[in-house]
Image: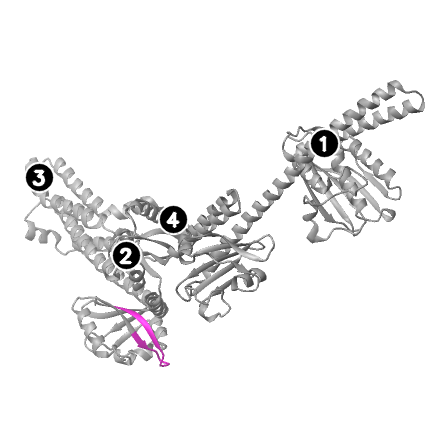
Amino acid sequence: MSPLRRRAETWFPSILGCLVAGSTLVLVALDDDRSIPAAIGEGALALVLSLGVAVVGYRYYARSDLPEAHAGTVARWTVTATGLVAALVGWFGVLETVIGEVTPLFAAITAIAVGMLGGTTIGILSARVRKRQADRRQALEEYAALFESATIGIFVHDPEDGRIRDVNPRGAELLGYEPAELEGLGVGDITADVSGFDAETARHRMQRAMAGDSQTFDWMVERADGSHRWVEVSLDHVQFGDETQLIAFVRDISDRKAHEHRLQRAEQRFRSLAENTSLGVVTIDETSTIQYANSGLQRLLGHDPDEVTGESLTRIIPDRLHEDHHEGLARYVRTGETALDWSGIEFPALHADGHEVDVEVSIGELSTDEEHLFTGIIRDISERKRREGQLTQLHDATREMIQAPDRAAVCETAVQRADDVLGLPVTTIWLVDDAGERLEPVASTAAAREMFDPMPTFAAGNSLSWRAFETGEARMIADLQDHPERHNPDTPLRSELIIPIGKFGVMNVGSVEPDDFTDNDLLLARLLVANLEVALERTERERTLERHTERMEFFNSILRHDVLNGVTIIKGRAGFLADELEGESARDAETIIEWGEDIEAIIYRVRTVLETLTGEAETELHPVEVAPALRTELDRVESTYPDVTVETRVPDGTKVLANDLLGEVLGNVLTNAVDHNDPADLTLVVSAERPDGDRVVVRIADDGSGVPDDRKEAIFGRSETGAGPSTGSGFGLFFVDAMLAEYGGDVAVEDNDRGGATFVLEFRAADAG
């Protein structure tokens, strides 16, 4: 439809009324027979009626929604009414009867206005009636479509007896019927035969709904096949014309009920577990208000669950942690970010009596549309913390024992730590004597000394302590009275721990109560003893080192004074002889001088080595090329052992940080390889490489008998020699190990694929950063 036509259909009554009014005014103006007031008097009725048409057309037609569908109806009534009035028989006679005698033109316009006003009014009223009927039909059609296609069940009930008048397809499907099969059935016919669900209760709810109190409730229905299903029912009354209907909207909630049932069972299991566990269980909401606490919380922290429920969680948290707790919870609720690992948070909890208890809490979260909950499982870790503290203190005790100056001080530290750290007040340490025949007391706690004075000594074979030392197996004795082989039949001790200290002795821990020690006591005591053994081994090594150092210093003193002075005297006397003698005798004197100078050189070199090993002189390192030093030593080996095959892969220019003793270091390894194998069938392969920028590795491999695994560390001990009595300087592999340490390197021995041994010497590269 064009815009012009649409406007015409909307405004035509008003336009017609305005045209008639305008025509009336024109006639008034053109009437020369009367004055203007008299002319207006004759046309007043026409003017009023035409303006009435314009107002009615504007107010009750143009401003309504009638022009969209009912313009034709209004137009037909307007035209029809106007024509009827105009066709009245005795037109002027009628007008005269109604309005008196007037001018014919004014009478005609008045008649037109009457017909237009009447027709327009009747047309508008008729259009409104038709529109209401059309709207009602459309609404009923829409309701019917909605009723048929709704995804929830809709039941129409008789408000008097509750019987089903109508049901939509979804409602019938929900109950397993055809819609026609449900019509006429009562509520009791579709209610499950279960306690709490009956027709009387249903009718009561229906009556309340009819009274204006809408009802929403869960109900269990019985389907056509006899099965039961949970539904949610919403009851309300609806007015259809003059009739009131009771409508039930029914939704299947079986899945929700099953889920709720599972949740209820889970909650029951949770509560059963929570109430029977020794752990504390606390549930809080996002404001940190306690919603649930189990009896385990009271066993753990002394708080009554009923008293703390509804209180803030800060009731069981020390004051100094309140701010951190609130900030952390608020941040998580706001951002979802946690600063701690919820699988295990350790903190001090506040006991009801005021003291703090070390606990660990594992946190779980439950978030629904209705609530946001956090559940914590709380366990007491006080014992674990105590053990951790003991381990830390044992670590400190190890450092103290390592720093102790002698064996007695080491053992004294050990027994004191057994007392104040492990809570073992009756502790004594026995060490084996030099002959290996007796265990003699070295250190005891004060309680042990008060109980045993003097402290016993254990000889071989006459005590439980000696047997533990001999077998190396720790023992935990529940009651000494059950062991007739105990050293003292009248001992006041009832239970005892006996822990061997390796090759050094035993540590005994006693108690006057039977079965007074736990596996944890034994574990911690063995840990202390293990550290004690390490400290004693260190002390023993230091003692051995001191003895060797003293010997080397003595040997160095002999070289410096006695031997060197003697050589000096020999050289002096030989010089006098060389000056006095001639011929062969003079040459012999010269030979004596040369040998004296060689001996002096050897003495100075040996003195340098001894001063390096004893720490009397600082080792000055400088770049030394490997190849020349190695070549000199290989020449010596080849000249001494002509049957030995030597292969070398040492590039020229390879330099390491060392000193003038590098040749001696390499020579000792080479000589060791020859002296400990058969020279007649021996091949030596010597190589050098730089695997990275900071290291140079020299490998000396042989195809001899190799080195047993249990000797790979021991061969570098001070008692080992690396050369036979006829060759080399005789400082052995100990010298090699010591000098590599001075160089900042390392030495080790490995097996090779030819069955022999490979000595690996690692040096610092001369140009390393």
Q: Are marks 4 and 2 in contact (CB under 8 Å)?
A: no
Q: Colour scheme used in the picture?
A: one colour
Q: Is residue 292 left or right of residue 614?
A: left
Looking at the rendering, which quadrant does residue 640 occupy?
A: top right
- Spot occupied by residue 739 in the image (x, y as percentages of width and height): 68, 36
Q: Label for residue 559?
A: 1
Please name the predominant secondary structure of the magenta segment in the image.
Answer: strand
Upstream in the sequence, badge 2 or badge 3?
3
Q: Is residue 190 above or below residue 395?
A: below
Upstream in the sequence, badge 4 or badge 1?
4
Name the residue rendered at 32%, 65% in the picture.
146
Front label number (2 vs 3)? 2
> How far, Cα to Cα, is label 4 from label 1?
80 Å
For the residue pair 311 and 637, the one nearer the viewer reads as: 637
Q: At numbered mark 2, what does the secondary structure look like: helix, strand or loop?
A: strand
- Spot occupied by residue 250 in the image (x, y as percentages of width and height): 30, 69
Kind of residue indicated by mark 1 = Leu
Q: Which residues are magenta?
A: 220-234
